[in-house]
Image: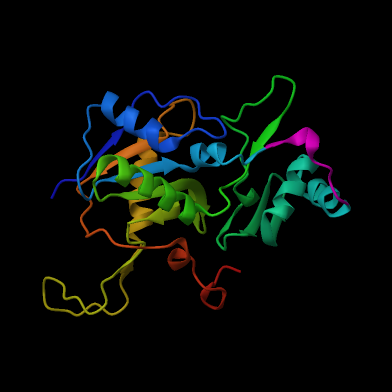
Amino acid sequence: MTLSLTSLKNIPFIRQGDNLADILVNSLRETNIELQDDDILVLAQKIVSKTEGQMVNLQTVTPSAHALELAEKSGKDPRIAELILKESNEILRVRFGSVVVEHRLGFVCANAGIDQSNVKGDEDSEYALLLPVDPDKSAKEIRDALEKITNKKIGVMIIDSHGRAWRIGTVGICIGLSGIPALIDERGWQDLFGYTLKITVVGVADELAAAASLMMGQAAEGTPVVHVRGFPYPLGEGSLKELIRPKEQDMFR
């Protein structure tokens, strides 16, 4: 069993309206990779958000009274606090430097996934980048376009870096996918000694997201797309919703 992950070369600085499928095809060519059936492309959410116009000029944001209160408690820029409120279903925890929320997409994360690193707009303005509106839909549209160009059956995944309860440090997690299983349910499988597994459900999309995130880096690497070959499970349809633990099972809230 071999799993290979390769960072794609020469991905340009992405701007709103760019055709990601064409950019990816060109980058695959320059990286000397020819897509095969069952390959997967893993994309950092930033390039997807940028093409979809999710960059917000902070000069256009007017903080509400609630945002001003949140900013005072958290030490956040009041304009960022306003965006956090708009991108969240619920504020769960606040401490200086961090606001933990239930994002509008359903998962729990810090600061509603809003990012200001590697985000550049006009010289005289500050920008923040929001997560894609519907990452599953974004992944499907990119996958459909690539499959039309290449005539290959592939998977596409969009990832972001999140912290985790009980652990220090961020890891890559899946926030959108198409053509890839989110989970592999191994309940009923037998181990080497014939024991029947009873509770094992593997978050394979998050496992692959973490591996791809290693290849992308977090700072100035400029490698926001990773090609994957040898994924050890059959491709199939998954969704972000499958990865989100229902509130009634969430012991951390």
Q: Is residue 18 visible?
A: yes
| Residue depicted at 29% across the width and 39% down the height | 227
| Residue depicted at 55% across the width and 30% down the height | 15
Counting from the top left corner in percent of width and height, residue 26 is at 33, 28
Nearest to the observer: residue 128 or residue 148: 148
Q: How many marks?
A: 0
90 lies above or below 117: below
Counting from the top left corner in percent of width and height, residue 188 is at 22, 80
| Residue depicted at 79% across the width and 37% down the height | 60
Q: Which residues are magenta?
A: 56-64
Horizontal arrangement in the rendering, residue 181 relative to residue 176 (left or right): left
Which quadrant is home to the C terminus? bottom right
Counting from the top left corner in percent of width and height, residue 133 is at 58, 52
Horizontal arrangement in the rendering, residue 194 relative to residue 143 (left or right): left
Residue 21 within the segment the image draws in magenta: no
Question: Please, which residue is most extreme toward the top here?
Answer: 123
Horizontal arrangement in the rendering, residue 233 relative to residue 102 (left or right): left
Q: To which quarter of the image does residue 203 belong?
A: bottom left
Q: Is residue 173 visible?
A: no
Nearest to the observer: residue 9 or residue 221: 9
Residue 63 within the segment the image draws in magenta: yes
116 lies above or below 179: above
